[in-house]
Each structure stands twice: as structure tokens, then as C-alpha cells.
């Protein structure tokens, strides 16, 4: 294959690989070719009303992220779904952030997530984090730090637990998402929240983000 033909084919090869390994991520990249209703960078699925309440909740989530990062540079694609087909195609009932292979991150909000400013802010924080470090940095960042940083703007009471020093050290050993998703998820998320909060109390957010993405 000639070099120029390879570079033309590369995006299609990547999407093929993503479909095989992470189909929800692949479908998210192709949302512009779906029948979803587009409002700028937001794609609305069947049965979703792009009303004032939803727009205000999205704005409130964005405001939390801007406050955490002292500004914002991300412009993620946002997919909002409530129907069963859309949920299985793009994510789950709550929310998900898919790394943007060809650009910005893609945030999916399910029927529960779209009604929660906490979940909206959490997923948008992932998108902002991703915009700062890129795909490689994201893949190198420990899972506990990614989720703990998202929890800084997620104030759901269930995750406001106290933890021992041993528990905080234990959660910081959960480097991969497969490890992080094992055991008591509420405890994992709340411990990660505290671990990252302690780091932020002792240093600059963006410097900490940069260090974590290079571990």
C-alpha cells in the first residue's frame, strides 16, 4: 500500500479496530451520521426534549468544571439518549466519556445522567481533563485519578464518605479501570475523591494532572 493511500485509509482502519474492541466508543464517533437531532455540539436522541431545564443543567455542569479548572478549553460532543437502543449503543443509564480519537472527547448522558447536574459535571470534567492531556496522556493516567478528579465536581451524598489512610493508599493502587471497577464501587469513587482532593489541597491542579499523565 502506498504511503498516501495508507494515510487515507488510517481513520477507517482505526474505526474498524474500535468497533471490534469498543463498539460504544465507535458508535459515539459516528453520531453525526445518525438520525439524532443536532443542536450545535449536542446530539439529542429520540424522546429527548431539548428544553430549558436540560440546557440550564448542562450550563450548571459546565460552570462547575470551569471553576475546578479555572477556565475551560474543551468543546466535547454531547450525546443525550433515553431510549434502550441508544443507551446500549452509546453508553449506559448514567453517563460515559469516550476519548475522541480524531479530536474532542465525546460525552454520553443517559436517562438518569441527563437529570443530574452531578453526573453531567462529572462527565464534562473528564472531557476537560482529556482536552488537557490528549489521548496518550489519558491512557497513561491512573484510573483512580481520572475518577477522583471527576468526583471533585460530583457532589452526590453517597460518595461523601470518610476513609482511612490505608483505604486511600489502597484505591491509589487501582491503576486500571478493570481494577477500579472491582469491589465496592461507591467506596472506590469516594476514596478516589478524597485522594485527589488531598493532592489538590497541596498543589496546582494542572501541574498534578500533567504529572499523573506521565506516570
Image (cartoon, rainbow, N blue to C red):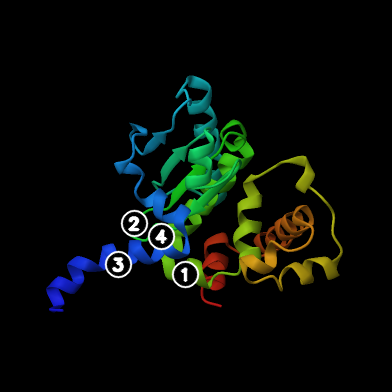
Between residue 74 and residue 183, name the one nearer to us.
Answer: 183
Mark 3–mark 1 Cα distance, whole angstroms, equals: 22 Å
Q: Secondary structure beneath disc 3?
A: helix
Examine the rendered structure and indicate whether residue 113 appears above or below residue 8.
above
The answer to whether residue 73 is visible is no
* Disc assigned to residue 19: 4
Q: Quadrant of the C terminus?
A: bottom right
- Tell which tag, 2 or 3, sits nearer the viewer: 3
* Residue 126 x %, y %: 53, 53
At a point 33% along the width and 66% down the height, the residue shown is 14
Mark 2–mark 4 Cα distance, whole angstroms, equals: 18 Å
Q: Secondary structure beneath disc 4?
A: helix
CB atoms of marks 1 and 4 within 8 Å: no
Reading the image, the residue beneath label 3 is: 13
How many C-alpha atoms fall within 10 Å of the one at disc 3: few (<14), some, or many (≥20)?
few
How many C-alpha atoms fall within 10 Å of the one at disc 4: few (<14), some, or many (≥20)?
some
Between residue 63 and residue 122, name the one nearer to us.
Answer: 122
Mark 4 or mark 1, which is nearer the start of the sequence? Answer: 4
Mark 1 or mark 2, which is nearer the start of the sequence? Answer: 2
- Tell which tag, 1 or 4, sits nearer the viewer: 4
* Disc assigned to residue 190: none
CB atoms of marks 3 and 1 within 8 Å: no
Mark 2–mark 3 Cα distance, whole angstroms, equals: 16 Å
* Residue 53 x %, y %: 53, 22
Mark 2–mark 1 Cα distance, whole angstroms, equals: 14 Å
Q: Quadrant of the N terminus?
A: bottom left
Reading the image, the residue beneath label 2 is: 103
Reading the image, the residue beneath label 1 is: 137
CB atoms of marks 2 and 1 within 8 Å: no
* Residue 119 x %, y %: 61, 41
Q: Secondary structure beneath disc 2?
A: loop
Amino acid at each position: 500500500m502506498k504511503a498516501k493511500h495508507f494515510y487515507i485509509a488510517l481513520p477507517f482502519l482505526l474505526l474498524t479496530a474500535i468497533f471490534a474492541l469498543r463498539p460504544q466508543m465507535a458508535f459515539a464517533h459516528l453520531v453525526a451520521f445518525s438520525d439524532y437531532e443536532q443542536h450545535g455540539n449536542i446530539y439529542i436522541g429520540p424522546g429527548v426534549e431539548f428544553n430549558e431545564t436540560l440546557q440550564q443543567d448542562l450550563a450548571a455542569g459546565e460552570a462547575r468544571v470551569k471553576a475546578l479548572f479555572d477556565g475551560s478549553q474543551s468543546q466535547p460532543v454531547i450525546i443525550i439518549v433515553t431510549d434502550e437502543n441508544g443507551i446500549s449503543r452509546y453508553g449506559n443509564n448514567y453517563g460515559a466519556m469516550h476519548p475522541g480519537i480524531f479530536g474532542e472527547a465525546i460525552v454520553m448522558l443517559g436517562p438518569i445522567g441527563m437529570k443530574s447536574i452531578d453526573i453531567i459535571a462529572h462527565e464534562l470534567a473528564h472531557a476537560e481533563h482529556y482536552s488537557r492531556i490528549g489521548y496518550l496522556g489519558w491512557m497513561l493516567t491512573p484510573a483512580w485519578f481520572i475518577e477522583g478528579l471527576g468526583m471533585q465536581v460530583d457532589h452526590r451524598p453517597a460518595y461523601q464518605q470518610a476513609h482511612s489512610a490505608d483505604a486511600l493508599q489502597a484505591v491509589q493502587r487501582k491503576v486500571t479501570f478493570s481494577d477500579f471497577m472491582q469491589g465496592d464501587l461507591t467506596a472506590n469513587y469516594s476514596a478516589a475523591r478524597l485522594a485527589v482532593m488531598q493532592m489538590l489541597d497541596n498543589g496546582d491542579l494542572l501541574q498534578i494532572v500533567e504529572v499523573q499523565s506521565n506516570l
